[in-house]
């Protein structure tokens, strides 16, 4: 049987229901539903027990996340012993220069005004024909 930990992946409040669901091998939503229904019928006593348990039950141990494209997280478990064990830097898309942004906005405004002028011309033409 698995040991009870507060879940790191399936956590809504403290991860206690997620950890209990992992331990019992059931759906965490079912555990949360049972906890809520039981809390209502126990006049809130279960809420106090939930908070105490969240202080006592340890958090799931962190086994390390992926580093530098290694799927298991630990590059040394794949026989890699090079200097690149840190995570890869996050990609940030290039930001448009303020002058480019101003030009884009002017172009958008120009197109919107042209569309408005075309609509007004169509209304005037309709009015002149007497189709109003």
Image (cartoon, rainbow, N blue to C red):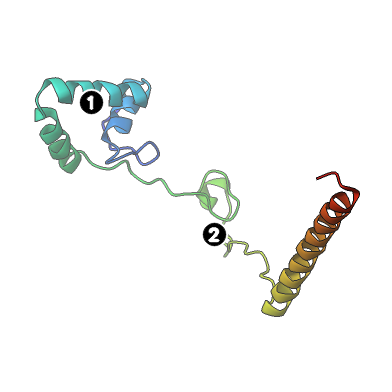
Reading the image, the residue beneath label 2 is: 87
Say which residue appears at 80% left-offset and 63% top-offset. Answer: 111
Label 1 SS: helix
Where does residue 60 sit, x and y in percent of width and height? 32, 41
131 and 29: which is toward the camera: 131
Say which residue appears at 82% left-offset and 62% top-offset. Answer: 117
In the picture provided, is 42 more to the left or to the right than 95? Answer: left
Where does residue 21 sit, x and y in percent of width and height? 32, 25
> Around disc 1, counting alpha carbons within 10 Å, would you say few (fewer than 14), some (14 to 19), or many (20 or more)?
some
In the figure, 105 relative to 57: above or below? below
Q: Quadrant of residue 116?
A: bottom right
Judge whether residue 1 can be spotted in this image.
no
> Around disc 2, counting alpha carbons within 10 Å, would you say few (fewer than 14), some (14 to 19), or many (20 or more)?
few
Q: CA distance from mark 2 to mark 1?
A: 40 Å
In the picture provided, is 102 more to the left or to the right than 1? Answer: right
Judge whether residue 80 can be spotted in this image.
yes
Where does residue 132 sit, x and y in percent of width and height? 80, 45
Q: Quadrant of residue 45?
A: top left
Q: Nearer the viewer, mark 2 or mark 1?
A: 1
50 and 120: which is toward the camera: 120
Reading the image, the residue beneath label 1 is: 36
Say which residue appears at 27% left-offset and 41% top-offset. Answer: 14
65 and 95: which is toward the camera: 95
Label 2 SS: loop
In the figure, 34 relative to 4: above or below? above
Q: Indicate which disc, 2 or 1, sits on the residue closer to the N terminus.
A: 1
Which mark is on residue 56?
none
Where does residue 37 sit, x and y in percent of width and height? 21, 21
Query: Please, which residue is most extreme toward the front here?
Result: 130
């Amino acid at each position: 049987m698995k040991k009870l930990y507060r879940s790191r992946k399936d956590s809504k409040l403290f991860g206690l229901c997620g950890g209990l669901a992992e331990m019992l091998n059931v759906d965490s939503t079912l555990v949360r539903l049972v906890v809520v229904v039981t809390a209502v019928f126990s006049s809130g006593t279960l809420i106090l027990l939930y908070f105490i348990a969240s202080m006592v039950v340890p958090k799931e141990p962190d086994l390390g996340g992926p580093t530098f494209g290694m799927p298991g997280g630990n590059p040394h478990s794949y026989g890699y012993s090079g200097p690149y064990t840190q995570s890869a830097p996050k990609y940030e898309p290039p930001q448009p220069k303020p002058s480019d942004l101003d030009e884009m906005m002017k172009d958008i405004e120009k197109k919107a005004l042209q569309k408005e002028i075309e609509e007004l011309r169509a209304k005037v033409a309709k009015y002149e024909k007497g189709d109003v």
